[in-house]
Image (spheres, grey):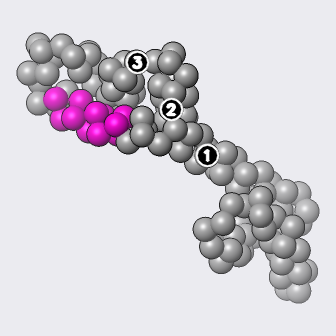
Amino acid sequence: YRDLRVRIDTGIHTGRMSYDDAVDLFSQVVNFQSGSCRDAATLKNDAKRASCESSERAIFRYSKWPTQAITYRLGKDQIFALRREAQQLLGDKFSPKEFHVLFMKQGTIPAGYFREELLKEIQSKQSGK
């Protein structure tokens, strides 16, 4: 789902994908509803019509906030990289639960801003056990 949002975000804002094509793609991939949201015959199906309406709302939002989807994806990648780094650092002493508790305590700032501090804290807590 996030990868699709990135594809749509970049497609719309680089001019490689039309708004209508983005709505169709979202409806097809996310809701598994085949057919175009611009086809009157297809829209007679209640499920497809509902899918097109929700897809339209999503694409409208994506079209107004360029790069939002990309930044979410980059944040996810940073979090996974930080977790892998903590696992490599601690080996068998790594605790996914402890990592996530400490990570969430950092608040809503990007992972790159507190990486070193978090790794130090994880290592000291794990070695103290």
Identify the residue at image location x=85%, y=57%.
85
Residue closer to the observer: 52 or 87: 52
| Tag of residue 18 | 3
The mark total stands at 3
Q: State the CA–CA distance, disc 2 to disc 3.
A: 11 Å
113 to the left or right of 88: left
Looking at marks 1 and 3 on the same chain, the residue that comes earlier in the sequence is marked by: 3
Q: Note whether 67 is above or below 109 in the view shown.
A: above
Does dot 3 land on a helix, a strand or a loop? Answer: loop
Q: Amino acid at mark 1?
A: Thr
Q: State the CA–CA distance, disc 2 to disc 1.
A: 11 Å
Q: Note whether 7 is above or below 16 in the view shown.
A: below
Q: Residues within 10 Å of mark 2 (few under 14, many from 20)?
A: many
Looking at this view, name the residue that lies furthest to the left.
Answer: 44
Mark 1 — residue? 71
Looking at marks 2 and 3 on the same chain, the residue that comes earlier in the sequence is marked by: 2
Q: Position of residue 61 (x, y in %)?
A: 38, 42
Identify the residue at image location x=64%, y=50%.
76
Q: Position of residue 73 (x, y in %)?
A: 61, 44
Does dot 1 land on a helix, a strand or a loop? Answer: helix
Q: Amino acid at mark 3?
A: Ser
Q: Position of residue 88 (x, y in %)?
A: 88, 57
Looking at marks 2 and 1 on the same chain, the residue that comes earlier in the sequence is marked by: 2
One can see residue 7 in this view? no
28 to the left or right of 52: right
Q: Which quadrant holds residue 122?
A: bottom right
Give the main secondary structure, helix, strand or loop, of the magenta stretch: helix
Q: Position of residue 8 (x, y in %)?
A: 48, 28
Q: Which residues are magenta?
A: 49-60
Q: Which quadrant holds residue 63?
A: top left
| Tag of residue 91 | none
Mark 2 — residue? 9
